[in-house]
Amino acid sequence: MKVNVTVNGRAYERDVEPRTLLAYFLREDLGLTGTHVGCDTSSCGCCVVVLDGDRAVKSCTMFAVAADGHEITTVEGLEQNGVLHPLQQAFWDSHGLQCGYCTPGMMMTLVAFLKQNPKPDKHEIREAISGNLCRCTGYQNIVKAAEQAAAELSKAAEPQTAGVK
Amino acid sequence: MFPAAFDYLQAHSADEALAALAQHGGDARVLAGGQSLIPAMRFRLAQPAILLDINPIAELAYMREGDGFLEIGACERDAALEVSPIIASRYHLIADASKLVADPVVRQSGTVVGSLCHNDPAGDWPTVALASRAQLTIRNSKGSRTVAADDFFVDSFSTAVADGEMAFSVRFPTPSGRTSGSYQKIERKVGDFATASAAVQLTLADDGTIRDAGIAIGAVGPKATRVAAAEALLNGQKPTRDLIRAAAEEAKKIADPSPDQRGSAEYKREMAGVLVARGLVASLGRLGVKGEA
Ligand SMILES: Cc1cc2nc3c(=O)[nH]c(=O)nc-3n(C[C@H](O)[C@H](O)[C@H](O)COP(=O)(O)OP(=O)(O)OC[C@H]3O[C@@H](n4cnc5c(N)ncnc54)[C@H](O)[C@@H]3O)c2cc1C
Ligand code: FES
Ligand code: FES
């Protein structure tokens, strides 16, 4: 079955079996191995990608054929022209990762979340990533990174009114 | 594990979905958020020959209030309920539950109607639907029927939706007057199914007596169960500590839990009572009734 998807701004057309899960399509058909598979049973959040800009989905729990006509962002799509995305920079600065296995899913969950809620408090951040498991960090620094990224992103989104009062 | 092979169809309108269901009958399975069906297919607990994806049907992704109901379409996702000001202001029981179903990422795909159709004994929405007297609209290519929640949930993982049919929406009666509610859930961790749960909705009369009580328990039997005996005890009465205790006893009597990794049958039965009592106290608190209760 034909699938046409845009992944990280690039259009792809592939022929897949309907039962191909999106995570495997991204990793094996498109070679985008930044999306990790952890539990493979919808429980850990490792495989989260962003659909159409603002919806986080577990790519192990969606069929590739269902993504036909949609836009997908994976962790590979965050960095632009050699500049890290504010979330990536914040994870770096705050040591928001250790082994890095959960990191793509964490970041993509947060990308969607910060679109839905640009100025979250600590508690809301913790809620937002409550379906993403991390076995290394203890979450503290991930929350810190999310706070830094939220501040950075909302600064960038504010209209340029410097000097105007 | 990978699902067994299937044929994949997409419906882009309600009519297209109904035509496909009329053609394929029991061979076709509706795919909504996929958050229960896809895991079931991966474990080969479900092996549909044809998957009918209803996600592209934009006309079914809605939530609207009118004619005495809050109506939620088959493609409306859980995440929309969590941020709805209408739900936050008037539908307290639904508001509570919307934050406790699965985890936040699952809620960005899962649908309320899909969860009702799945009818997991530990699912959150069936319990809420029973306590709030919800109705489901079911259609096939020939017509439409409305089924009360009481008649919709047949047995574990089985509902009133027949082959060739699809659920189109769920309708929750708009609370009138002094109504509040509360959803109580014990879970081992975020995103887990309930160890036990209780849904409570109360409407008070002007004199402070309970005009209408809705009480249901979940995860403590083959399906979510309305505790009619507790409702009967409360209706027409002024809420008191003793009455709440008696209502909780009725929940324990009707609970029929199975032991599993989440707890023993004895523990779950006890919790069914505790959660009904907590739900009643929380609902009354929201209605400004404290002290005695
Ligand atoms: C990690 C995880 C944790 C979860 N935790 C919870 C939890 O705590 N509480 C809880 O209640 N649920 C939980 N769930 C289940 C989740 O809420 C599901 O989204 C929900 O139960 C099913 O909704 P869906 O839209 O995904 O339906 P699907 O998975 O697409 O479908 C479920 C079933 O309903 C049928 N169906 C769907 N829509 C229709 C329709 N319109 N007409 C007829 N039949 C239809 C399908 O054919 C299928 O048999 C969890 C899921 C996951 C993956
Ligand atoms: S790999 Fe998808 S949720 Fe764990
Ligand atoms: S950094 Fe290792 S699992 Fe999160």
Image (cartoon, rainbow, N blue to C red):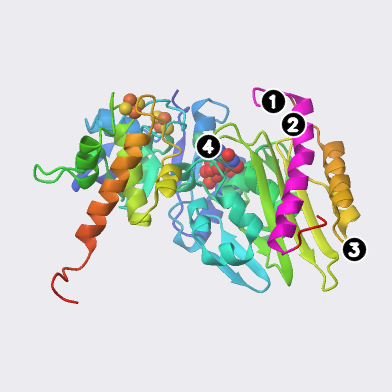
Q: Is residue B279 left or right of residue A135?
A: right
Q: Please report the residue visible at 39 percent of the width from the left and 29 percent of the height from the top.
A: A138
> Three-letter amino acid code at disc 3?
Gly
| Residue on which disc 4 sits | B190
Q: Are marks 3 and 4 in contact (CB under 8 Å)?
A: no
- For disc 2, the chain is B
Q: Mark 2 and mark 4: span between their CA atoms?
A: 18 Å
Labels 3 and 4: the sequence-earlier one: 4
The outermost residue toward the bottom is A165
Q: Mark 3 and mark 4: span between their CA atoms?
A: 38 Å
| Residue on which disc 3 sits | B236
Q: Please report the residue visible at 66 percent of the width from the left and 74 percent of the height from the top.
A: B67
In the rendered view, tell whether residue A9 sits above or below residue A1: below
> Three-letter amino acid code at disc 2?
Lys
Q: Is residue A78 left or right of residue B269?
A: left
- Which span is picked out in magenta? B259-288
Q: Mark 3 and mark 1: span between their CA atoms?
A: 36 Å
In the rendered view, tell whether residue B215 sits above or below residue A18: below
Q: SS of the residue at dot 4?
A: loop
Residue B217 drawn at (x, y percent): 75, 43
